[in-house]
Image (cartoon, grey):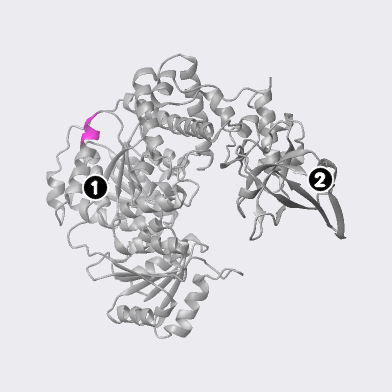
């Protein structure tokens, strides 16, 4: 017997060229091949009389060859083979292009099973290139449920199926990892039957049962892995915080905390008193007050004799956090310092001296915080802002600068709770679902090109009132064949033709970091009226004077992304607006964009985005932390996910440390999944 870890080249017919084609599908081993699951199935089990065949609807039928097939050579590279077939209900003409071998395979007077779709307005006109098998042959492509696989150039569905069939014949499928009691409770097939049935189902019902098993298995493995991580963290011991009095902190605030902020701070304080490392996500919409929650956590850490560090993804965001936290905490006797890459070597050295000596109690910075040169005296709390924008290695490098420090993650990207459980499943979650008093709703409108002159006038009106405007384009530069606005061309058009008397700036992701920071800082200081940009401004830009967001070709963006862009305005006291331009007339696209116009609730929008586009839209970067699922689909399999989470939680409580073969196999599979997910994040 072969092993699952053997390369696919052990199979007949797979040499270096074929192996390279399979590699394009991330198939390298027999296990990869067996776990390359069908994307769907064609039910070819039912035989239809010829007279019942419907145009353009593929179906199986039994028919006898009524004449000897004839092949005509039309021109170089084109041969046509024609033959008549019939059953007891009707005749049908079959045409094959460049398939001269059919003339030898189809014998006059013999019956075959065919699969194809008739064309034309009337039954009996013609069928082009159907697949067929003799009536007495094994059912390989007809009379069966045929799996349809994801393919790549050079690989046909038949070649993938042939390889999978070979692999299942020479090695055992992955071993059983779901305990028998769990399988019985949730109606789950055993592993061996499921892995065979997903590729060779006897019926559509069996295919569904196999799919259910394998989806459940993926969710079960991931959920069990998260539970083990939680249990491992809970087993660690750190000194509990004894001083969690926030009276002085709250008196220093220039405003009253919202109920959601108070609730989140209370949850954090409870974590810090528990005596185990905190690992909590504070998730809230733009403007919900996450920074003040982080400030309260830092205050508690510092009051208990520890240092705190906050890492932001950009220098401008780090500087904004530094300014607001210094203003709040310095009067309370807390030293706040800033450490970013743009500081001079001397400035960095002085800041690092303060950090190492303990004089700096709270350090705000970018990736400069994880440098080997940055050493903390007693780091007790690590805060990461927009954590999915950091690589795994960066986050672990910062936490490694303390001894089991508490971790607080902040995210302004609204994530449906289901997705949050997967992406941040090893974290406790606090949700800020209230906006501070005085925040006005941003009115959003969907328009087409017929409104262009009116929107231009609207832009001029905002600028004339002393405010600023963002204009976001989906592309940096013009691309041939793509009828979308590019930031470079559109910025030039606005400056030279539309608003020659206004100040137009350009910002995009292809610029160097220092240049981007300088342009954004200049816009924040009021040195430009209009900033034409790509989605580089999506997160972490605070310009209270900006009151208008115009998004060109809005259909090119996901709902959550559009909501993040909209969050760049409405940060001051003036009324703000968001204009979505789109020429797309697709009803589903229009429905999606209109959903954004109806609500400013980021969580509601995120749920709709998950339903319409799936999870990939939330995090375009590969370092999102989402697991690599082979068959499970977060937008379709939510009920199975919930069942798997319940089952895995119970398994951890009762058998998590068991020494059974299934428990060992499950722990091994958990390690494999997290290793595979980690590979996509670095």
**What residue appears at the point 85 percent right and 42 percent down from the top-left corner?**
104
| Extent of the magenta region | 270-274
Which element is circle 2 on? Answer: helix
Label 2 Cα crowd, 10 Å radius (few <14 / some 14-19 / many 20+): some
Provide the residue designation for mark 1: 293
Binning the other alpha carbons within 10 Å of mark 1 as few (below 14), some (14 to 19) or many (20 upward) gives: many
**In x, y percent, where is residue 524?**
34, 68
Quote the CA–CA distance across marks 2 and 1: 73 Å
Can residue 72 be seen here? The reply is: yes
Q: Vertical placement of 235 versus 558: above or below? A: above
Which of the two discs, 2 and 1, sits closer to the camera? 2
Looking at the image, residue 199 sits to the left or right of residue 511; the answer is right
- On the rendered structure, is 47 left or right of 595? right
Q: Magenta stretch: dominant SS?
A: helix
Q: Which residue is mark 2?
A: 102
Q: Is residue 272 part of the magenta span, yes or no?
A: yes
Identify the mark at residue 56; answer none if there is no mark. none
Q: Is residue 301 left or right of residue 19?
A: left
Instruction: State whether residue 457 is above or below residue 606.
Output: below
Foreground of the two, 233 or 309: 233
- In magenta segment, residue 609: no
Q: Nearer the viewer, residue 235 or 252?
A: 235
Find residue 270 and report its horizontal and vertical position in percent. Answer: 21, 34
Comes first in the chain, label 2 or label 1? 2
x then y, percent, for residue 18:
74, 40
């Amino acid at each position: 017997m072969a092993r699952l870890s053997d390369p696919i080249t052990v199979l007949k017919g797979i040499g270096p060229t074929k192996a390279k084609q399979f590699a394009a599908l991330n198939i390298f081993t027999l296990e990869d091949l067996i776990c390359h699951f069908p994307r769907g199935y064609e039910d070819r089990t039912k035989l239809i009389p010829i007279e019942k065949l419907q145009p353009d609807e593929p179906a199986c039928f039994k028919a006898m060859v009524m004449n000897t097939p004839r092949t005509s050579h039309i021109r170089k590279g084109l041969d046509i083979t024609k033959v008549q077939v019939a059953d007891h209900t009707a005749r049908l003409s079959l045409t094959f292009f460049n398939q001269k071998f059919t003339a030898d395979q189809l014998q006059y007077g013999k019956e075959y099973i065919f699969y194809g779709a008739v064309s034309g307005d009337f039954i009996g006109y013609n069928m082009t290139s159907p697949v067929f098998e003799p009536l007495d042959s094994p059912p390989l492509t007809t009379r069966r449920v045929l799996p349809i696989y994801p393919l790549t150039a050079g690989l046909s569905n038949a070649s993938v199926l042939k390889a999978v069939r070979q692999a299942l014949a020479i090695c055992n499928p992955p071993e059983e990892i779901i305990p028998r009691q769990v399988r019985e409770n949730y109606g789950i097939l055993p592993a061996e039957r499921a892995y065979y049935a997903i590729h060779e189902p006897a019926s559509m019902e069996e295919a569904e049962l196999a799919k259910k098993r394998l989806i459940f298995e993926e969710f079960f493995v991931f959920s069990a892995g998260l539970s083990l991580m939680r249990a491992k963290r809970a087993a660690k011991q750190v000194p509990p915080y004894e001083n969690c009095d926030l009276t002085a902190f709250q008196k220093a605030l220039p405003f009253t905390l919202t109920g959601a902020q108070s609730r989140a701070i209370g949850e954090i304080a409870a974590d810090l008193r528990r005596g185990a490392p905190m690992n909590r996500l504070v998730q809230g919409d733009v403007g919900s007050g996450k920074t003040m929650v982080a400030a309260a956590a830092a205050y508690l850490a510092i009051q208990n004799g520890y240092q705190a560090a906050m890492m932001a993804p950009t220098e401008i965001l780090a500087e904004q956090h530094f300014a607001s936290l210094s203003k709040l905490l310095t009067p309370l006797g807390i030293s706040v310092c800033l450490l970013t890459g743009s500081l001079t070597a001397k400035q960095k050295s002085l800041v690092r001296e303060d950090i190492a000596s303990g004089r700096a109690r709270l350090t705000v910075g970018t990736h400069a915080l994880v440098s080997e040169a940055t050493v903390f005296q007693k780091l007790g709390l690590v805060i990461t802002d927009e954590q999915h924008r950091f690589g795994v290695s960066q986050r672990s490098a910062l936490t490694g600068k303390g001894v089991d420090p508490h971790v607080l993650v902040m995210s302004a990207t609204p994530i449906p709770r289901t997705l949050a459980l997967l992406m941040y499943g090893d974290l406790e979650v606090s949700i800020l679902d209230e906006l501070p008093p005085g925040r006005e709703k941003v009115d959003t409108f969907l328009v087409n090109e017929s409104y262009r002159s009116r929107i231009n006038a609207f832009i001029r009106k905002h600028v004339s009132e002393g405010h600023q405007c963002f204009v976001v384009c989906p592309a940096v530069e013009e691309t041939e064949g793509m009828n979308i606005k590019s930031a470079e061309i559109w910025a030039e058009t606005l400056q030279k033709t539309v608003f020659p008397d206004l100040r137009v700036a350009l910002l995009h992701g292809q610029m160097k970091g220092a240049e981007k920071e300088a342009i954004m800082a200049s816009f924040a200081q009021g040195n430009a009226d209009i900033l034409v940009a790509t989605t580089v401004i999506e997160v972490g830009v605070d310009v209270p004077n900006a009151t208008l967001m115009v998004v060109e070709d809005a259909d090119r963006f996901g709902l959550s992304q559009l909501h993040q862009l909209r969050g760049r305005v409405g940060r001051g006291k003036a009324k703000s607006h968001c204009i979505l331009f789109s020429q797309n007339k697709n009803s589903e696209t229009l429905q999606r964009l209109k959903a954004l116009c109806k609500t400013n609730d980021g969580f509601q929008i995120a749920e709709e985005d998950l339903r319409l586009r799936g999870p990939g839209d939330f995090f375009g970067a590969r370092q999102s932390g989402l697991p690599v699922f082979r068959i499970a689909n977060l937008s379709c399999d939510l009920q199975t996910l919930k069942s798997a989470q319940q089952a895995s939680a119970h398994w951890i409580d009762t058998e998590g440390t068991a020494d059974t073969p299934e428990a060992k196999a499950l722990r091994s599979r958990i390690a494999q999944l997290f290793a595979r997910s980690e590979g996509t994040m670095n």
